Image (cartoon, rainbow, N blue to C red):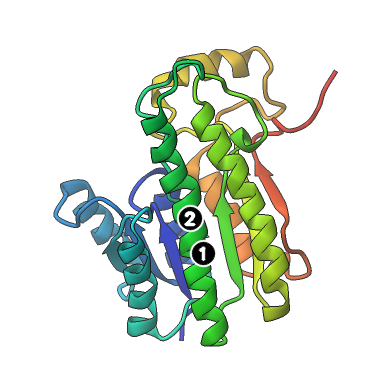
């Protein structure tokens, strides 16, 4: 039987690349996102996913909803009897970039509820089921270089990603004895629809020497790291941070 992977935020950008890469690697993917399956873009994505992995399924789920979180995990167990890999990729950016002195409570609540609280509670429920059913070996959280890099025009995003980094540490500690390794992947400047509005700014910074590897990252760069971890490349590591950022994290003089 193929390994079962849940990927949240799966229908576009980094999540799409992850889900298609795992499917091509022989995984059966439960691809989750908030967008209804009647959406034309989602229909095209589902067709693409199933052309690679006919057994894979798409689940409409909002991870900020308790009912949707449980529905997603329960679906995987009802349909396949197990989860081997959970990839927590779902996340949103602020709808409007604002200086932290003008950031609204509503924006902070939205990003915390989806990017941090939703992911924490989804992981809690999934891990509990994995332990109960004695299955699964890998949980991967997709955070961001914003987990440690100040960006004062989107402070709520930085706070949520920093919190998610600690979620990785906590679950890595708790689940090691259960045979489940937990990892954090920190993407850098990745070319997706989330960064399209500031692409010109990033292009100029990169051209001016911001990154040792002088280009924007691609979703496939992140997907390749997920595949390596899911396939067991670092079985004697847990709580590890994998930077997929073109070397941004290197301190240079």
Numbered tag placed on residue 119 in the rendering: 2
- The answer to whether residue 247 is seen in the rendering is yes
Q: Is residue 65 above or below residue 134?
A: above
Of residues 173 and 54, the one nearer the viewer is 173
Residue at 43% of width from left, 60% of height from top? 7
Q: Are marks 2 and 1 in contact (CB under 8 Å)?
A: yes
- Point out the residue furthest to the right here: 253
Q: How many labels does the image show?
A: 2
Q: In which quarter of the image is the C terminus?
A: top right
Of residues 63 and 34, the one nearer the viewer is 63
Numbered tag placed on residue 123 in the rendering: 1
Residue 33 at what x, y percent from top left?
Answer: 32, 54
For label 1, count other residues whose C-alpha is less than 10 Å away and answer few (under 14), some (14-19) or many (20+): many
Element class at badge 1: helix
Residue 44 at what x, y percent from top left?
Answer: 22, 53
Which image quadrant is residue 209 in? top right
Residue 190 at what x, y percent from top left?
Answer: 51, 35
For label 2, count other residues whose C-alpha is less than 10 Å away and answer few (under 14), some (14-19) or many (20+): many
Residue at 50% of width from left, 48% of height from top? 116
Residue at 67% of width from left, 72% of height from top? 175
Residue 131 at what x, y percent from top left?
Answer: 57, 82
User: Is 38 on the left-hand or right-hand side of 123?
Assistant: left
Numbered tag placed on residue 178 in the rendering: none
Residue at 66% of width from left, 50% of height from top? 166
Of residues 9 and 12, the one nearer the viewer is 9
Report, in whole angstroms, how far the alpha carbon at label 2 lies from the one at label 1. 6 Å
């Amino acid at each position: 039987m193929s390994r079962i992977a849940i990927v949240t935020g799966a229908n576009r950008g980094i999540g799409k690349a992850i889900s298609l890469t795992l499917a091509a690697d022989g995984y059966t993917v439960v691809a989750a996102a908030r967008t209804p399956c009647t959406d034309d873009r989602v229909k095209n994505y589902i067709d693409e996913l199933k052309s690679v992995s006919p057994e894979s399924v798409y689940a409409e789920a909002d991870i900020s909803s308790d009912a949707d979180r449980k529905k997603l995990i329960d679906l995987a167990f009802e349909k396949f009897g197990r989860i081997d890999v959970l990839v927590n990729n779902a996340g949103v950016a602020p709808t409007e970039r604002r200086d932290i002195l003008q950031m609204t409570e509503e924006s902070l609540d939205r990003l915390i509820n989806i990017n941090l609280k939703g992911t924490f509670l989804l992981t809690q429920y999934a891990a509990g089921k994995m332990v109960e059913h004695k299955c699964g070996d890998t949980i991967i959280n997709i955070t961001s270089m914003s987990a440690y890099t100040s960006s004062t025009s989107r402070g709520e995003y930085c706070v949520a990603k920093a919190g998610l980094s600690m979620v990785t540490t906590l679950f890595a500690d708790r689940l090691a004895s259960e045979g489940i390794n937990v990892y954090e992947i920190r993407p850098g400047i990745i070319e997706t629809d989330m960064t399209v509005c500031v692409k010109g700014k990033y292009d100029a910074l990169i051209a001016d020497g911001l990154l040792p590897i002088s280009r924007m990252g691609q979703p496939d760069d992140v997907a390749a790291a997920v595949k390596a971890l899911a396939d067991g490349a670092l079985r004697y590591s847990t709580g590890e941070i994998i930077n997929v950022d073109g070397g941004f994290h290197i301190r240079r003089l």
